[in-house]
Amino acid sequence: MRAPAIRYYQTGSFAAGNRLLDPEQRSLQAGEERTNSITCGHRACQGCGEALGARYALDAAMRATNGQLIAANATGCLEVFSTPYPETSWQIPWVHSLFGNAPAVSTGIAAALRAKGREDVRVVGQGGDGGTVDIGFACLSGMFERNDDVLYICYDNEAYMNTGVQRSGATPPAARTATTQAVGPEPGNVFGQGKSAPLIAMAHEIPYVATATVAELHDLEAKVQTAMELRGARYLHVFVPCPLGWGTASKDTIRIARLAKESGIFPVFEARDGEVTGVSKIRRHLPVEDYLRPQKRFAHLFRPQENTAVIARIQAGADRNIRRFGLLGEPGEEA
C-alpha cells in the first residue's frame, strides 16, 4: 500500500490546501478516531521531528491492528521526553528497553505472544539512530536473520541528541557535532564513515524495508499500514530533523525534511525481500546547497568562504542516490 500522489496547485510551493483535496487525502491533526498513541504533556523540543514521526507512525500501526499493539522503545530522546518519571505520554502498552536491546526485547515480546497463541497482538520496536544504527545493531541484525514478527522503526535525527549531539553512524559527512567539531583542514564529520541501515536491512532480504520522512505523513502512514499487513521482520527508517542538534528553526522541520528528499540526500523508497519495489520521485530537483545552508551544523561550509570542494562531494553523494534509486521522474511514477 502506498499513499496516492497529491498534485500541488500553487506554483513554486508545496501547498495544496485541504479544500482542494478529496476527503480521504486530507490530513487530520486530531479526531475521535485517532489513538493519540503519544499524547500531550511530553517534553520534546519545539519542532521535534521525532515526536511528529512517532505520533503518526504509532497511530497508523494502531489503526492497522485494531488497537492490538505493544511497543518496545530504546533509550533515547523519544523515551526520555515522553516518560519523565513518574509520568508518561504513551496511551498504548509501552515498554522501555535499554539503549541497545530494543530489537531483542521486541523479539521476546513477540515470542511470548506466540507462545500464548495471541496472533492478534502485534509488536513494534522503535529507537533513534544511535540505538539502532550503532549500539543496537547486532540485536537488530539478529532480529532480521531470525525473521521475527516485529516492525522496527528507526527515527533518524543523525546524531546522539539525547546525550549532547555526539556523532552516530548515521551522521552525514561534514556535519558538526559535539565530537566532530568544525575545526581543522577537514572540519565536521569525516567522509567515508557511517552506514546505511536501510541498505543493510535489505541485504538481510527481510519481507519489507522502507524509508519515509515527516514531510510526507500520508506516505509514512501508508508504509506502516503495509508493514503491519505482513508477517516477519520489517524495517522502517524515518528521517526526522532535530532543530536543536541541527541548528535549524523550529518552524522549518517539515521544510528541511522535504529538502532532504528533493535534493536526493535522503532517498524515499520501499523494498520487498531485498529488491526495491517503489520510490517516491523527486518533484522538483534542488541542489544540496539548498538543504545544507539553513542548518548551523553545516555553517562552516559557507563562511568565512564557501567550501565548494566539500559541497561538491556531498552533491556527488546525493547524485549517486538519485541514480541508484531512479529518483528523477514524474511525481507518483512507479520505480
Image: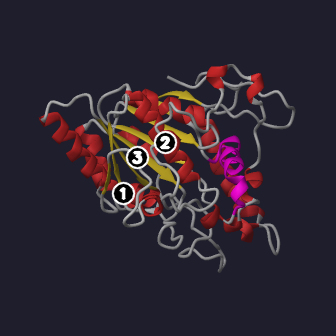
Which range is magenta?
248-265
Q: In this rendering, is residue 283 above or below 20? A: below
Residue 36 numbered tag: 2
Q: Would you say 314 lies left or right of 31 here?
A: right
Quickly name the residue at label 1.
74
Secondary structure under badge 2?
A: loop
Which quadrant of the view contains residue 26? top right
- Work out whether residue 196 can be spotted: no
Which quadrant of the view contains residue 67? top left
Which of the two discs, 1 and 2, labels the residue nearer the N terminus? Answer: 2
Which of the two discs, 3 and 2, labels the residue nearer the N terminus? Answer: 2
Amino acid, disc 2: Asn
Which of the two discs, 3 and 1, labels the residue nearer the N terminus? Answer: 1
Residue 296 part of the magenta-drawn span? no
Q: Are marks 3 and 2 in contact (CB under 8 Å)?
A: yes
Q: In this rendering, is residue 67 above or below 145? A: above
